[in-house]
Amino acid sequence: MVETDRIAKAWEVLETVEDPEIPVISVVDLGIVRDVSDDDGTLKVNITPTYSGCPATQVIEDSIVEALDKADMRPFDVKTVLSPPWSTAMIREEGKRKLKEYGIAPPADDAVDKKALMGEERQITCPNCGSNNTHMVSQFGSTPCKAHFKCKECLEPFDYFKCL
């Protein structure tokens, strides 16, 4: 297999690896997979956890190894890279769309979350009805990387993927 074909196949395989906490989005869509390269016949996959204390980090790495094994991509090496750190800017547009369709508000721009540091309320768009008339119920949602909100229009609760 030609090196570029092997790398393209690896990306296709990685697109099928779901995030264990948000199964509608792949680790590629989330930006966890940083790079895929070929080094003298060994596939190199660099990944970065969404944050250093993420409890899903090992599960994600194991799922990547399993998927690459199943696709007969050996030899390969999956390496965790911490610098530069992951940020929500790495989430692909497709990933943001999938989050919204799943009922999780995708990260807003940095300015929205920075306002919260100054005591101002975040204006997060409800993924269910599109209203900005929402309020934060809890700084932590179903996982530490999400905050819990409620829409004042449709009255539905939802998680917001915090901007990091």
Image: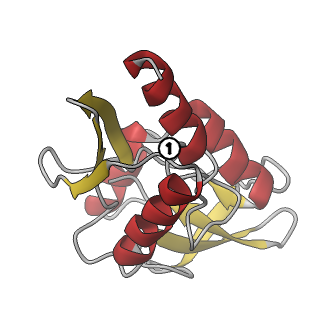
Relative to 148, say whether 133 is above or below.
Answer: above
Q: Nearer the viewer, residue 119 or 161?
A: 161
Is 76 on the left-hand or right-hand side of 142? left
Is 1 on the left-hand or right-hand side of 23? left
Task: Count numbered badges in the picture.
Answer: 1
Q: Residue 164 appears at what percent x and percent y?
A: 32, 54
Indicate the secondary structure of the residue bearing disc 1. Answer: loop
Q: Which residue is mark 1?
A: 28
Residue for point 15% across, 55% down: 82
Residue for point 67% across, 65% down: 23
Q: Does the rendering let one see residue 110?
A: no
Residue for point 28% across, 30% down: 38
Q: Does the rendering let one see residue 156?
A: yes
Is 160 on the left-hand or right-hand side of 86? right
- Residue type at numbered disc 1: Val
Q: Residue 112 appears at what percent x and percent y?
A: 42, 46
Q: Residue 60 appears at what percent x and percent y?
A: 44, 67
Residue for point 19% across, 50% down: 85
Assess disc 1: are there few (<14), some (14-19) or many (≥20) residues with their C-alpha within 10 Å of its C-alpha. Answer: many
Q: Residue 79 appears at what percent x and percent y?
A: 22, 55
Residue 117, quarter of picture: bottom left
Q: Nearer the viewer, residue 158 or 102?
A: 102
Relative to 143, say whether 134 is above or below.
Answer: above
Colouring scheme applied when the structure was drawn: secondary structure
